[in-house]
Amino acid sequence: MNLRLPLSTLALASAGLLSTHTASADELQFLCYQDGNECEVLAEMAEAFKAETGHTVVTETVGYDIIREQLENQLQTDAAPDLARVTSLGGLNQFYLDLTPYVDAASWEENYSAVLPWFRSPGGEDNGIYGWMTQLTVTGPYINVTMFDDAGVDIPADGATWDEWADALRAVKEELGINAGLAMDRTAHRMAGPAFSYGAKFFDDDGQPILVDDGFKAFAETFVGWHEEGLMPAEGWPAGSGTQYQNAAPLFLAGDVAMHMSGSWMINNYATNIKDFEWRAVPVPCGPGGCGAMPGGSAITAFKSTESPEAAAMFIDFMAREENAEKFAAATKNISAHQGLQQSGVDYGDTSPAVSQGLSVFAANAGKAAQTTPQAYTFQGYSKNFVIYAVVPDYLTQAITGEITLDEAYQLIDADVAAKIAE
């Protein structure tokens, strides 16, 4: 049954003034993936939403590959859910329901203005509100503190450069005889932050993607060199091909490397599974281009195809309220995208010191990126960033393994990105 409330009533609801059940209740299908316990928490909070509005949210928890590989196809058929938790924010814009008629747009702009553009269509003319960021994720490194202690190597301070970190990791590797110093997930998303630090812009002054500039070359040469000298492991990027994603967490968990370049979403995993050594999130390393980190995260969006647009919008608006956003962040140990909560802080309760420290470090990394490498936020909101994510690992890996030269990789990256963006 569709819910058709007048906009005046909906405005009251979005402001939190309508707490009684609506005259008719809808059932919403919500497709959700989780890195930790996010879907479990969302399902629990959906019960509070039902108590307030009468609407039911049926949460179906699936693997991330379903969201990544199958959701878009579902959205083109009658099998589409009403809501989903997504990461390709701009890439799915054509399917989003604009929430603006159903919510207090001024409040959303006040509390989420930094991330709302990530959902919008390119060109700067789209002012719609399309989803709620369940959390803000930020890339950055973790270190094995025990290895640094055992090797007698000082941990570089906040503001240290990637070159200084590389020197420290070389010393740890040499002293302890470990497999490698640094592992990085095989994806352009992880290498983007260090590339920004070395001065890569990713876009020209007109906002068009230009990957291969002097800053990109500076980091690419450094990155390939780290592999050639053995600072980075053969089990990382060289072990993958094409667009294949390679998670470096197993190398860090096994004690094969002293640093893992990953992101804030790994905090709960490491807090749960690391028992044999002390670990720590560290401030993102810097360089001549700034202190680069890639922001991102997942969001709950509703789709145009839903038969219950008002109810779907009400659920997203419910989750976006400050008190609910804080509850979700605290229960899932994530960084909130709510700008007021970023300033006031989230009470994470009795969380471990390592988790609390990690959340603080990654929140600071997001701030450094916003101040020193704003192209990171532009890149996150770019509707075709998936093209760059697909192209870069393939050709850089071929350069690492010696199949092509770096100069050839640069030419192929530029040509392939240009061709795919033009499609």
Image (cartoon, rainbow, N blue to C red):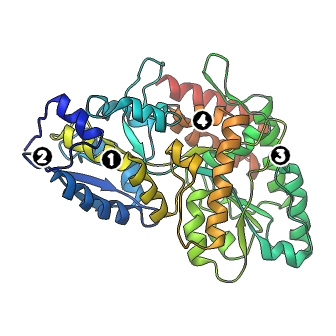
Label located before the other in sequence (4 or 2)? 2
Residue type marked 3: Thr
Q: Position of residue 319 (x, y in %)?
A: 35, 50
Question: Upstream in the sequence, badge 4 or badge 3?
Answer: 3
**Residue 160 % position (x, y):** 85, 51
Q: Along the polypeptide, which appears first: circle 1 or circle 3?
A: 1
Residue 398 relative to residue 178: left or right: left
Question: Height in image: 394 above or below 99?
Answer: below
Q: Nearer the viewer, residue 233 or 324?
A: 324
In the image: residue 120, left or right of residue 274:
left
Q: Which residue is mark 2?
A: 22
Query: How far is the residue under mark 4 from the one under mark 2?
Result: 39 Å
Which mark is in front, 2 or 3? 2
Which badge, 1 or 2, comes first in the chain's sequence? 2
Quadrant placement of the N terminus:
top left
**Where residue 134 sits in the image (x, y, percent)?**
43, 51
Q: Judge the density around disc 1: few (<14), some (14-19), many (≥20) Cα neighbours within 10 Å.
A: some
Relative image position of residue 253 (x, y in whole percent) = 65, 74
Assign a secondary structure to mark 3. helix
Name the residue carrying label 1: 71
**Label 1 to label 4: alpha-carbon separation:** 24 Å
* Distance CA(mark 2)–CA(mark 3): 60 Å
* Residue corresponding to mark 3: 222
Looking at the image, is 35 positioned above or below residue 112? below
State whether residue 150 appears in this view.
yes
Measure the alpha-carbon separation of dots 4 and 3.
24 Å
Q: Which mark is residue 377?
A: 4
Cβ atoms at labels 1 and 3 below 8 Å apart: no
